[in-house]
Image (cartoon, rainbow, N blue to C red):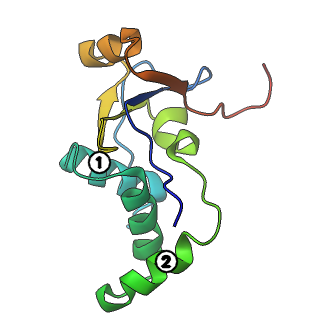
Amino acid sequence: MKDINYYNTFIAVADDCQVSAGEIPQAKGGVKTVPVIQYEMISHSPYVYTQADVLFEVHAVRNGIKEEEKDLERERFFSRSQACLRTSSLGKRYGWGIHHNAEGKMALYAVESEEYRQLLQDRSIKQLKAMRSSRKG
């Protein structure tokens, strides 16, 4: 399985993100959306999960994969190409930067926070942006 995690990297919000402060994504119709699951995992347990952990857990939750099936399904899931968290609504729509530490574990930082500004200025880590929502430049 190819390593898809980021290390020592900060993913800043997209250039066309519409919010000036981090917003907590909400479930729709009682159903947890992809950004809700991502937000809950990363914000409730900072620097515990890698990008691969979060991507797979979202897949598992949304597809009702049982605990005993997870090892085999994880292998199957990552045998196909997966979009990285630069495409996540957390950075595109909700105003959250994602920091990946040296072990590839992640934490969220609201765009208006001092920690976000510090990470954005830190030249010792790789700087990326979340993908734009629109194709217009």
Q: Say which element carries label 2.
A: helix
Residue 15: x and y, percent? 60, 20
Between label 2 and label 1, give the one nearer the viewer.
Answer: 2
The residue shown at (39%, 37%) is 7
Q: Is residue 129 above or below residue 113?
A: below
Quadrant location of the C terminus in the rendered image: top right
Confirm whether residue 31 shows in the render.
Answer: no
Q: Between residue 136 and residue 42, name the one nearer to us.
A: 42
78 displayed left or right of 121: right
Q: Between residue 45 and residue 9, name the one nearer to us.
A: 9
Check contact, mark 2 vs mark 1: CB within 8 A. no
100 displayed left or right of 82: left
Q: Between residue 132 and residue 8, name the one nearer to us.
A: 8
To which residue does mark 1 refer?
42
**Which image quadrant for residue 110?**
top left
Q: Is residue 30 above or below residue 70?
A: above
To which residue does mark 2 refer?
75
Residue 48: x and y, percent? 22, 51
**Which image quadrant for residue 71?**
bottom left
Q: Check disc 1: other Cα within 10 Å, few if <14, some if 14-19, many if 20+.
A: many
Residue lying farthest bottom? 68
The residue shown at (49%, 34%) is 91
Sequence-wise first label, 2 or 1 = 1
Residue 57: x and y, percent? 38, 67
